Amino acid sequence: MRFSNSKLRLTLFSVALVASFQCFAQNANLELQAPVDSSELESANVDETRINNPESIVVQPAMTEILRAKPPAGWKLAYQFNNDDTRFADFTPADEDNKTWRTKLSIESHQNMDDIDPISAIMGEVQNNSEICSNFNHFNLFSGIENGYPTSVRLIECGENAHSNKGEISIIKAIQGNEHFYFVRLLRRTEPFSDSAQAMETSEIAAWSTYLKDITVCDTQHADHSCLPEKKN
């Protein structure tokens, strides 16, 4: 990361993020929440037990494997796509949309991706981004096993995207489940930058990492991937 002050700042920040993700498997127990239109229930293929509770809909086929996540408070569902193999949902702050967003959360689940691991999947995106970005950097935040699933998390910095002419900062989390392969992305568009510290505060990136550590995959039928009880507020 090209912080203007010193490499020590990056080192301390990276250590804090790694420590944060090491406790992920014990702390993550949230489910993806999204508003649901009753006319879309069939196409969304949601679990029938959740139809009467529109604030607790799992965005994926109703199998024993569950991706547990929820958008930040006050964010809205901006876009959703579902077919037999891929399920995709975008969330933005209430005052943004899927075309003019400044900050976006994207969640994907894919079937038929058994031939790739999380690190390779993310590095494929890194390679694609490096070809269209100036002042490009990327850093591994965590790679290992969380709740029994191979997982990787990476920070990506794009000083200027040749397509959007914007700076972009993102954290991508990839999880290799037994039934699906999952991507969770937090993205921020900024003015073009040469120094990422001027584009986005370190404290905000750290807050993103804290949010992502609470996103987990679990399986209701397998003790090796146990679904913990929901947190009590």
Image (cartoon, grey):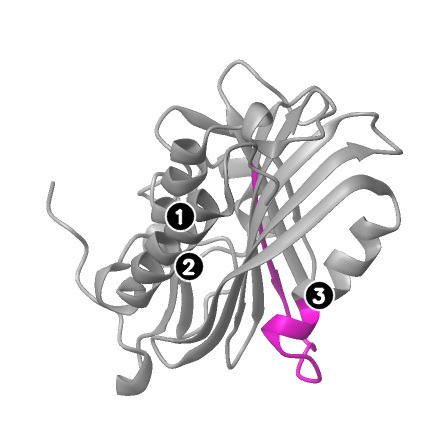
Q: Earlier in the sequence, mark 2 or mark 1?
A: 1
The answer to which of marks 2 and 3 sits earlier in the sequence is 2
Q: In the displayed structure, does residue 26 sit left or right of residue 41? A: left
Residue 107 in the magenta stretch? The answer is yes
Task: Kindly identify the amino acid type of the residue bearing the numbered disc 1.
Answer: Phe
Q: Amino acid at mark 3?
A: Met
Few, some or many C-alpha atoms within 10 Å of disc 1 (few <14, some 14-19, many ≥20)?
some
Mark 2 to mark 1: distance in Å? 40 Å
In front of the other: 73 or 204: 204
Q: Is residue 111 left or right of residue 150?
A: right
Residue tagged by mark 2?
Answer: 47
- Image quadrant in which you'd find residue 204: top left
Q: Is residue 84 magenta?
A: no
Asked if the residue under mark 3 is in contact with the one under mark 2, i.e. CB atoms within 8 Å, the reply is: no
Residue sitting at x 30%, y 75% = 220
Q: Tell me if residue 185 comes above or below residue 153 in the rendering.
A: above
Q: Which residues are magenta?
A: 105-121
Residue position for label 1: 13
Q: Disc 2 marks which amino acid? A: Asp
Above/below status of 209 relative to 114: above
